[in-house]
Amino acid sequence: MSPQFRILPRAPGGRRRLVVGNWKMNPATVDEAVALAAEVARIEAGGVEVGIAPPAIALGRVSDTVRGTALRVYAQDVHWEQTGAFTAQTSTSMLAGIAVGSIVGHSEMRRDQGDSDARVAAKATAALRAGLRVILCLGESLAQRNGGETDVVLERQVRDGIGPIPRDLLAAERGVRSAIAYEPIWAIGTGVAASGSQASEAVRKIRLELLRIGVDGNATTILYGGSVSAASVGEFARAEGVDGALVGGASLKPEEFAAIVAAFR
Ligand code: PEP
C-alpha cells in the first residue's frame, strides 16, 4: 500500500477523544432538558471532550445552564442558508454563542427530512465556514450490509458527502473542528450494537476514503454510534481507530452517560 494511504492505529498525534449525546426529540420538556444538562455537566470528563445535542428549542436555555463548564453544546442539525424561507430550520448564525457546532447527516434526518449526501456537504460547509464544529454522520442500512455493500456505501458517503467540502475548512486546526460518526443504521436505537471489529473495519475504510479524497483521515476523529451503552461501550473504547461515541438513548441517563465517557478516558 502506498504510504499516503497508510491508516494509523490509535489516536496518533493526539486525535481528540469525543463523546456526544444526541438527545433527539427528548426529554419531553425544555425544563427537563435544562435539568438533565445540569447533571451531565457534572460528569468527570478527564481528557475526553464531552458534548450534548439537545433539541433546537432547548439550545438557548441549555447553553446558559452549562456556560462556564467543560460541557459543549451542539445542535442536532443546521441549515446551509443564513436566513430565508426555510420553515423550522436553524442557521449557523443563529447558533452563535449558543452551540459550538452541529451534527449533520444523521440517518434520521436522511430518512425523515430527505437529507442527501449533497445536502449534508452543504450543511457541513456552512457550519465550518461559520467557525462551528461538525459531527458528520454516515453508515449503511441493514439491507446494504447484508448485501455486502457496506464499503461501497461508505465510499459514496465520503466522496459525495465530504468530498465537496472545501479542503481548507476540513484542514482547519488539523481536524479539531470536524469529526465523523460511523453510525450503522441497523444499530441505531435497536439495542443491537455493531461489534468492535465491525466498527474498526468501517472506521478504517472511512479513513482510507478520506485519504483518497485528499483529507487527512489519520487526523480525523471518528466516533462510533449505534446502541452504545454502559454495557457495550468497552468494545468500542478498545476498538482500533474508534476515538469516541455518538450516543442516543443512553445519553439521557446521566449515570450511564458518565460510564460511557469514562470508558474513553
Ligand atoms: C444516534 O441516534 O445517534 C444513536 C447512536 O442512537 P442510539 O445510541 O440510541 O442507538
Image: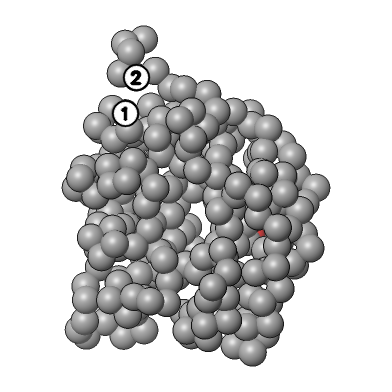
Return the residue at label 2: 5
- Residue 177 lies, with reference to residue 198, above or below; the image says below
Q: Can you tell which quarter of the image residue 121 is in?
A: bottom left
Query: Residue at point 58% right, 81% down?
Result: 65
Query: Residue at point 59% right, 88% down?
Result: 30
Query: Residue at point 28% right, 27% down?
Result: 212
Tell me the SS state at disc 2.
helix
Quarter of the image where ligand 1 sits: bottom right
Query: Can residue 80 be spotted in the picture?
Result: yes
Q: Left or right of 192: which side holds 205?
A: left
Tag 2–tag 1 contact (CB < 8 Å)? yes
Query: Residue at point 28% right, 58% down?
Result: 128
Q: Report, in whole angstroms, how far the alpha carbon at label 2 lies from the one at label 1.
A: 6 Å
| Residue 33 locus on image (x, y percent) | 63, 81
Foreground pick, 188 / 231: 231
Tell me the SS state at disc 1.
helix
Q: Amino acid at mark 1?
A: Leu
At label 2, counting other C-alpha atoms closer than 10 Å, the crowd grade (few under 14, some 14-19, many 20 or more) is some
Query: Can residue 195 be spotted in the picture?
Result: no
Return the residue at label 1: 211
**Mark toward the start of the polypeptide (2 vs 1):** 2
